[in-house]
Amino acid sequence: MTVTTPTPTAVDWANSFAEANNQDPEIQAHGKYFTCSYLLDMVEHTFVVQVSRGTVVDIAVDPGPLEVSYQFAIRASAETWRGFGVPVPAPMYHGIWAASFQRDMKLEGDVLVLMQNLRCMTRQIELLRAVGVPV
Amino acid sequence: MSKISPVTGHYVEVDVDGLLYKVFYLENGTGQPLVCQHTAGCHNHQWRGLLEDEEITRNYRVIAYDLPRHGKSDPPENTEWWKEEYQLSADHYANFIVALCDALELEDPIFMGSSFGGNIALQLALRNPDRFAGVIPVEGADYSPGFYLDWWQHPHANAAQVCGSGVWDLMAPQSPDADRWKTWFYYTQGSEAFKGDLYFYSVDHDMREHLGEIDGDNCPVVMLTGDYDYLTTPEDSARTAAQIKNAEFIEMKEIGHFPMSENHAVFRTYLIQALQMLRSKSGVDA
């Protein structure tokens, strides 16, 4: 029998990701001004994550063209995101800087907003190690 | 039993290139001097594990200094430095380290540095092979473009957090949380020097045409690089070492760009190998 880790559906994943963020001690301790919206482009699925004062208040799953606006985008292949979604990522899948410098990740849009929220964004992306990815 | 650490701190005056510095350093141990340079935008607490490593300090006098403008080493005493943009040059960086070793009257020191400290170690091997018994470039390479970025000092973002979290991915997920967070904390303290340091790291340092000129017999080179380093990868360091006469390269597993600070317990196993290689190359163990 082959045992595989089931890939969560996109909606289930969005709920789990929001819950993980909203219960995370580090983000809740330091996220008083963590407010932004961004696109997670995983090719097979896209999400627009809306964060307000440290709380994920909405995640749009596979939004249509022009439906939801966002400030910056984090784009990578499904393969790269799968590298992020394991408890201990292999080298170069262990963060958005690493994957941008050495893999196919792209940081686009108003990158200043990303930099303004970098501490909490770094932690939020690391939640993928526990939540997994839906691709 | 005393809770006072054997590590002591001192200041020494260094006069170099017309600039007068009051330099702070920590030291512990006896034997051959092992002079340690922290990474860009940081300070000498990155070497806290090595400074209290009983096995290594039994045979080496570990000296970890703060480069001027970092930690407890102030900017120059005799210039209006606040009227100029700080951009560290390879010339001044190398001249400073030699002047520091002279001021401390060190004989046959080994120089070790990480990241921009690894790159200057290569410069020292090229420029001053007679002054050093050997160098250990950690996370170093012939060329390391791409990190001289405005984000480190952008007035519309929190520079302390951008520096701390901007280098977070340079560490391995396997390294202990407490040590990674100490390293993050150090980086929140150095944003005004970080970008100027990276002028050397990513702009002024380019040894691609000069590796063959390093006298690796006179000044042996042993390079160490971690597999989670996305800036200077093991491939970059291996390529560099392959072009230096008599040089060695060791890839470190499950560790990143700040090995001495993020996980000294893992780093020390590789450092001990490197020190043994230097002893062997210099004929001490022959």
Image (cartoon, helix red, strand yellow):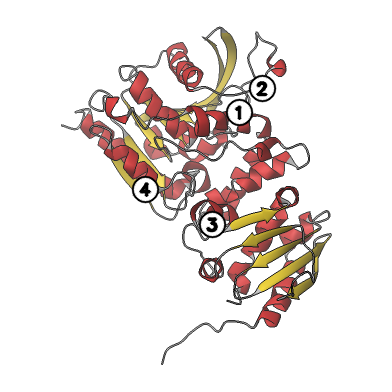
Mark 3 to mark 2 CA distance (whole Å) = 31 Å
Mark 2 to mark 4 CA distance (whole Å) = 33 Å
Residue B86 lies, in percent from the top left, at: 63, 23
Residue labelled with disc 4 = B235
Relative depth, front residue between A115 and A109: A109
Q: Amino acid at mark 2?
A: Glu
Quarter holding the C terminus of chain B is: top left
Say which chain tag 1 marks: B
Residue labelled with disc 3 = A99
Q: Amino acid at mark 1?
A: Gly
Tell me the residue at 51%/31% (across/down).
B203
Question: Is A43 positioned to the left or the right of A15 in the image?
Answer: left
Mark 4 to mark 3 CA distance (whole Å) = 16 Å
What's the mark number on residue B196? Answer: 1
Relative depth, front residue between A108 and A38: A108
Per the image, label 3 sits on a secondary structure element best described as: helix
Residue B29 seen by the camera: no
Residue A10 lies, in percent from the top left, at: 66, 80
Say which chain tag 2 marks: B
